[in-house]
Amino acid sequence: MMQFKLVSWNVRGLNNRDKRRVIKNIVGDWKADIICLQETKLQGDITELVRQIWGDRWVKMACLELSGTRGGIMMLWDSRIRKGEVLETGTYTLTCKFESQLQDISCHMTGVYAPNCYVERRLVWEEIGYWRINRRSVGNMWGFQCGKICFRKEKLY
């Protein structure tokens, strides 16, 4: 069985240096293997920012840039322990495949940023539904952030 420490966190923006310092301390304290950050509000080259969060030269990343002034998902992992690969980027989702470097085990991790708007959130569920129907090869884990409590009819998914 593949075991690892996963941190999934809605950071509400990573443009503040103090916030990056807090996240770096948590990474060090919790010794996470994979970190999924939602609502990063980032775009462009973020290599230096990633070093500020996880100062290790072995860190690898996948990123879904912000849309307008909101959103953004980032996944970080230690490449000595996990081999990671981006499988799919949607409008609101980022899915990566992780394989253990020590065992013959793999899994998928999907980071999700769901906006407040009911119509847009409906598109999130469509992306997730497409993934579940068309990519049933290995177990999934979900790093989720919803802007609000889901509506009752959304809980059926």
Image (tube, rainbow, N blue to C red):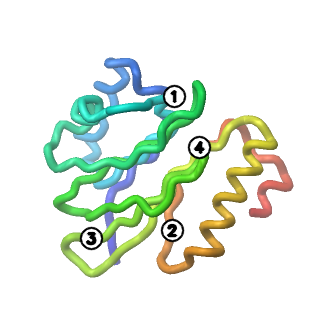
* Residue bearing mark 1: 12
Identify whether 59 is placed above or below 95: above
Q: Is residue 96 above or below residue 48?
A: below
Cα separation, mark 4 vs mark 1, equals 11 Å
Q: What residue does disc 4 label? A: 113
Mark 3 closeness class: few <14, some 14–19, many ≥20 residues within 10 Å: some
Q: Does dot 2 land on a helix, a strand or a loop? A: strand
Q: Disc 3 designates what residue?
A: 100
Q: Earlier in the sequence, mark 2 or mark 3?
A: 3
Q: Nearer the viewer, residue 15 or 148?
A: 15
Query: Residue placed at 47% from the left, 43% from the top?
Result: 64
- For the point 41% across and 44% down, the residue is 63
Could you tell me which secondary element the residue under label 1 belongs to? loop
Q: Amino acid at mark 1?
A: Arg
Which mark, by number, is residue 140? Answer: 2
Distance Cα–Cα, label 3 vs label 4: 26 Å
> Badge 2: how crowded within 10 Å, few (<14), some, or many (20+)?
some
Q: Which numbered disc flags the more N-terminal residue, 4 or 1?
A: 1
Quadrant where the C terminus sits is bottom right
